[in-house]
Image (tube, rainbow, N blue to C red):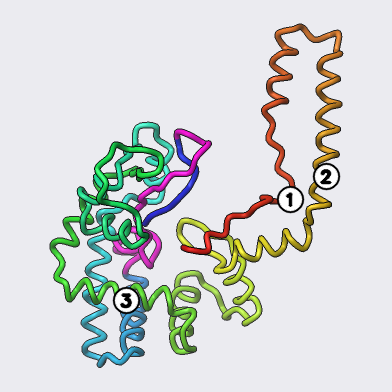
Amino acid sequence: MLYVKGDDRDATMNTLFALQSPLPLTSKERYLDENLWSTIEADYKMYISTLFKLVGRSPEEASDAAMKTIGFEKTLARSMLSTLESLLVQASREDYFPFSLFDAATRFPLSVGPLLDTFGLNTTGTEPITPGNRIVFYDLSYFDKIEALLHATSLDDLKTVIEYRLLQVSAPYLSSHFEKAHWAFFEQKLKGKTSPPSRASKCTEDAGGQATKESPGGLLHDLLGAYYLKERWPTERADKSMEYVQELTASAKASIQNADWVDEWTRTNALNKLAKIDFQLGGPGMPQLYPNL
């Protein structure tokens, strides 16, 4: 999975990161812990089979596709870090491996390379690493194992796995049969919910929910935010609010400069800190909506 966020070593810029992709069951323990797996195995097989039958597969073909998909996911789970391990490597100063896009695509030609190409990034340039042509990894061993798994899996089986993943992420937005199957397993079985959401609440969440690494969140999140700011935070209000902030800042600066109980070393440091405060009011003046992505 590719993810853009603030760089761990330079907070003034964003960086492209390669992270392990979440599995449908969200945690590796659900696949590898026999006690956990035994409670969901039959339901998960039925869910996968149902999706394949809904797109025209015979019961036998759907069952076979479910077995291949689960086998692939369980193998993939063995290569993954646990949630805690993943957080630890991301917090570590040592687990930070920058690659040029060319070097990343060369080392991981079956996994990372195609993703970079899909987003139209230049993976052919051999120039040194720069902020504009690099990608950072936390866990190289995971991607090495993914490369080996992809190489060892037949093309037909990979097509089956990809077809399921496409159906799985799309199911909540397809016809009612797909939506009901998805809700029955992921929401009712795994999360214990007792009733499906109303259409109004579902549309609200889909449109404006918060995005995370595990979920795309609101499909219109940034666009709705831009409309909200335009309606509730017009330029006149933003300018007037900033005037108040500037007046308060000037008052604080004068108080520091004129305080007779402060020594010069403390005064200088206080003024430096005050000058570095970056005030954020309301929202970005020019929100980036990335219409071409």
Image quarter in which the N terminus is found: bottom left
Left or right of 276 on screen, residue 108: left
Q: Which residues are magenta?
A: 9-37
Of the two numbered discs 2 and 3 in the rendering, the one whose residue sits closer to the viewer? 2
Where is residue 74? Give x, y as percent.
26, 64
Left or right of 238 on screen, residue 38: left
Q: Contact, CB < 8 Å: mark 2 with mark 3?
A: no
Q: Contact, CB < 8 Å: mark 2 with mark 1?
A: yes
Of the two numbered discs 3 and 1 in the rendering, the one whose residue sits closer to the viewer? 1
Q: Which residue is mark 3?
A: 164
Where is residue 195? Give x, y as percent.
58, 80
Q: In the rendered image, which quarter is residue 154 located in?
A: bottom left
In the displayed structure, 255 sits above or below 49; it is: above
- Separation of marks 3 and 1 at Cα, in angstroms: 42 Å
- Separation of marks 2 and 3 at Cα, in angstroms: 51 Å
Where is residue 127? Give x, y as percent.
28, 39
**What amino acid is labelled 3 in the image?**
Tyr
**What amino acid is labelled 1 in the image?**
Gly
Please give the name of the residue rendered at 57% of the width and 59% of the height, measured from the top-left corner.
289
Where is residue 282? Give x, y as percent.
73, 50
Q: Which residue is mark 1?
A: 282
Q: Earlier in the sequence, mark 3 or mark 1?
A: 3
Residue 11 among those drawn in magenta: yes
